[in-house]
Image: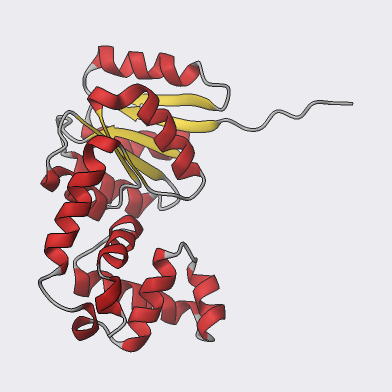
Amino acid sequence: MHSTTLPKVRVLLADDHQMFREALCHLLHSQPDMEVVGQVGDGTQVVELARTVQPQIVCMDIGMPGMDGTEVARQLLAALPQVKVVALSAYSDQQYVLDMLNAGASGYVTKAEASDELLRAIRAIMRGRTYLCPDVAGVVTGALFSQGGAARPSAVLGARERQVLKLVAEGCTSNQIADMLNIAPSTVEVHRRNIMRKLGRHSVAALTRYVVNNERGLRG
């Protein structure tokens, strides 16, 4: 009987601090289910290297030289939408976290918690989840509670948009939503774009947290 080896998660590390990057590289290589397929220290080189090495996850410092993390994330996800981004930062400030989530990051881990929390983040994201380390989870929840009071979601979104938003937050794909609502997948994509534009939330992570904190308003 032949044993089958599961493919390892392909990770690209982007951080301008070489010692920190090498420590993360050692950590990830020590895991049986992960491998580092590339390293880079300049924000302007992330997208090009990602095209070459085809990672599944990019762990990225938000303060690299050349280009800041939010812009790198936007360009990376526009070029390679299948890639998932984990933001790495020395900061847990509300604005840094929200900016990265709105740019499309699927996770945010502070460097102070980088070892165990980064491994948890990668594994959670590969299961289709969003991951925020404990340092920032409370910050984000509080921020979205305060933002949520600005306008009732029912006044901003149409009835169909509210249906789509709830299903997006439950983790449904556009095709699944189309089947549930008996509409075309292309129509679902239009709704998703309109929802993101109206709410100023530009990632599934941000939309999910919006739903959690505005559940009552979404019923209206």
Where, by quadrant of the figure, is residue 2 drawn? top right
User: In the picture shown, does residue 148 fall above or below 117?
Assistant: below
Q: How is the image coloured?
A: secondary structure
Is 51 displayed left or right of 209 in the figure?
right
Residue drawn at x 31%, y 67% as measured from the top left: 211
Is 139 displayed left or right of 27 in the figure?
left
Q: Quadrant of the N terminus?
A: top right
Residue 141: percent from left, percent from top: 22, 53
Given the current orientation, which residue lies at the most extreme right position?
A: 1
Residue drawn at x 14%, y 29% as measured from the top left: 65
Residue 193: percent from left, percent from top: 31, 72
Residue drawn at x 35%, y 59% as measured from the top left: 204
* Nearer the observer, 173 or 189: 173
User: In the picture shown, does residue 190 fall above or below 125?
Assistant: below
Question: Does residue 41 show up?
Answer: no
Residue 27: percent from left, percent from top: 42, 17
Question: Does residue 127 show up?
Answer: yes
Residue 161: percent from left, percent from top: 34, 81
Is 161 displayed left or right of 150 in the figure?
right
Q: Quadrant of the C terminus?
A: bottom left
Residue drawn at x 31%, y 47% as measured from the top left: 105
Is 128 displayed left or right of 15 in the figure?
right
Q: How many marks?
A: 0
